[in-house]
């Protein structure tokens, strides 16, 4: 055992650097931006994360191939047959789509487009219980404000983008809200935000700020209303599971909405450019 | 040279911690590899290296998590300096000591971060501590080994 004398000047200098970085971060966040140091840190960590996710996928695939080779070959044949069937269905669906579009045009309704967007994979999941965010990597450059969804429903939007990687704020984020409405003719409008506590059966959303005496029923579909311009109208959000009326004012309604997107298993998502 | 190697180790630790495979999670918790790396750097390189490790590790982790830097810096840099003071003391080069330090350090670090950003409910936070601390202590073994190898090869100047 021996006594060592350390020089403390470097420690103080590092503490000063830390203080400066903290102040810069607070200032940047105050303006809704990300500080240069954080961007630089993300720029070096994200490629490493991306490589590790790829490595993990390759390992899993190799493991599956080694253990279940014969069964996979049979499954492949079955899937090829199924693909052929689905291709036939797709052709039929496209003819229905064209027919539907023509009918909507006759009725004067907006014709919705064919599904668009680019697939992206999730490379990071926020562990902060309040700030529900994911980091995604797409095959093309991302932009701030890009909409992110799964086939089932809305996931959130890109709040920070660097090249083809970006941070997505989820519907479950405590500081996030979406203008929404009930999917019905003259459906009531409200605001969807994360329920403060996790409910049985997973994380829930709340639909509130509904007009007094709003007509909300269990089983109603909730979609984005497009008000505010952050999200386009008509994106599916979830289904109403419960309707709660205020004990003080029965006309005041809050609906518990189960999101369509499976937030516990977000591996791949689809990114849609605003207006795209 | 060692001050280039430590950030590379910390980048790797951050990336592995953030992409820890789901089948290796214990009750949804993975090990805190950045914490383990900061402890190992402190024990191997002294308080200055520990403080530097805490700064870089805290910056990387908070940036990827979207967390506030202040609390993370205080926790990780403080830990790096405190652990660095153990360098050269009895048994400080034993991996068991590094593991024990990790077991104690995680609750301490999380308590410091708690002051800066309180969690919405105590249940998940306690689970995070009770599962995360022993898991991190276990994961400290290979991390400490890697840091020791790098430190021995590159010989830091105090």
Image: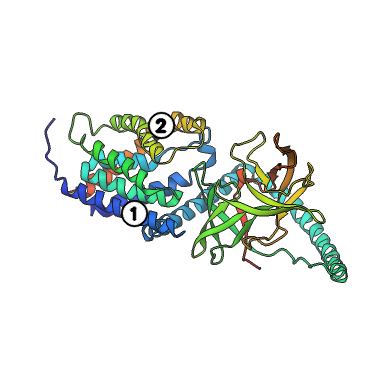
Work out which quarter of the rendered image holds the C terminus of chain A and state it.
bottom right
Viewer-side residue, A13 vs A97: A13
Residue A251, image x, y percentages: 75, 42
A180 with respect to B145 (left or right): right
The residue tagged 1 is A23
**Residue A150 appears in view:** no
The residue shown at (82%, 56%) is A185
Q: Nearer the viewer, residue B81 or B74?
A: B74
Q: Up-down: is B112 above or below A230?
A: above
Provide the chain ID for the residue under circle 1. Answer: A
Task: Give the residue drawn at x 23%, y 32%.
Answer: B92
The reply, left or right, for residue B3 in relation to residue A124 is left
Figure check: B46 above or below B101:
below
Q: Residue at x 79, y 67 (%)?
A: A111
On what subunit does the disc labeled 2 rest?
B
Q: Are marks 2 and 1 in contact (CB under 8 Å)?
A: no
Residue B58 image offset from top left, x and y in percent: 35, 47
Which image quadrant: the N terminus of chain A? top left
| Tag shown at residue B133 | 2
């Amino acid at each position: 055992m021996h006594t060592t004398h350390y020089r403390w000047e470097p420690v103080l200098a590092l503490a000063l650097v830390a203080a400066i970085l903290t102040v810069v971060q607070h200032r940047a966040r105050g303006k809704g931006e990300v500080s240069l140091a954080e961007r630089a840190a993300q720029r070096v960590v994200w490629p490493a994360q991306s490589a590790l996710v790829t490595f993990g996928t390759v390992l899993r695939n190799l493991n599956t191939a080694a253990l279940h080779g014969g069964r996979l070959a049979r499954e492949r044949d079955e899937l090829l047959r199924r693909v052929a069937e689905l291709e036939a269905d797709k052709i039929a669906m496209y003819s229905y789509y064209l027919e539907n579009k023509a009918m909507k045009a006759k009725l004067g309704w907006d014709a919705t487009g064919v599904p668009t967007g680019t697939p992206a994979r999730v490379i990071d999941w926020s562990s902060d219980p309040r700030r529900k965010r994911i980091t995604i990597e797409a095959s093309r450059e991302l932009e701030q404000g890009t909409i992110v969804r799964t086939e089932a429903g809305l996931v959130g939007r890109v709040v920070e983008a660097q090249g083809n990687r970006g941070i997505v704020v989820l519907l479950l984020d405590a500081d996030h809200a979406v203008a929404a409405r009930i999917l019905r003719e003259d459906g009531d409008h409200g605001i969807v935000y994360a329920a403060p506590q996790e409910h049985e059966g997973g994380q829930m959303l709340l639909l509130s700020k509904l007009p007094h005496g709003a007509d909300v029923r269990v089983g109603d579909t909730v979609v984005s209303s497009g008000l505010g311009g952050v999200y386009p109208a008509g994106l599916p959000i979830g289904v109403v599971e419960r309707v709660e009326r205020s004990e003080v004012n029965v006309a005041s309604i809050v609906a518990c909405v189960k999101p369509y997107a499976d937030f516990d298993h977000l591996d791949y998502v689809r990114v849609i450019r605003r207006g795209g | 040279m060692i001050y280039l190697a430590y950030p590379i180790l910390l980048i790797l630790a951050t990336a592995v911690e953030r992409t820890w495979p789901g089948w290796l999670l214990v009750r949804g918790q993975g090990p805190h590899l950045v914490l383990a790396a900061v402890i190992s750097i402190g024990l191997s390189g002294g308080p200055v290296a520990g403080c530097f490790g805490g700064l870089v590790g805290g910056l990387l982790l908070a940036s990827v998590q979207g967390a506030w830097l202040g609390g993370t810096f205080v926790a990780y840099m403080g830990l790096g300096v405190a652990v660095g003071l153990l360098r050269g003391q009895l048994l400080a080069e034993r991996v068991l000591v590094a593991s024990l330090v990790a077991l104690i350090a995680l609750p301490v670090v999380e308590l410091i971060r708690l002051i800066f950003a309180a969690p919405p409910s105590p249940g998940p936070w306690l689970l995070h501590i009770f599962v995360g601390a022993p898991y991190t202590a276990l994961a400290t073994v290979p991390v400490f080994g890697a840091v020791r190898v790098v430190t021995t090869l590159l010989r830091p100047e105090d």
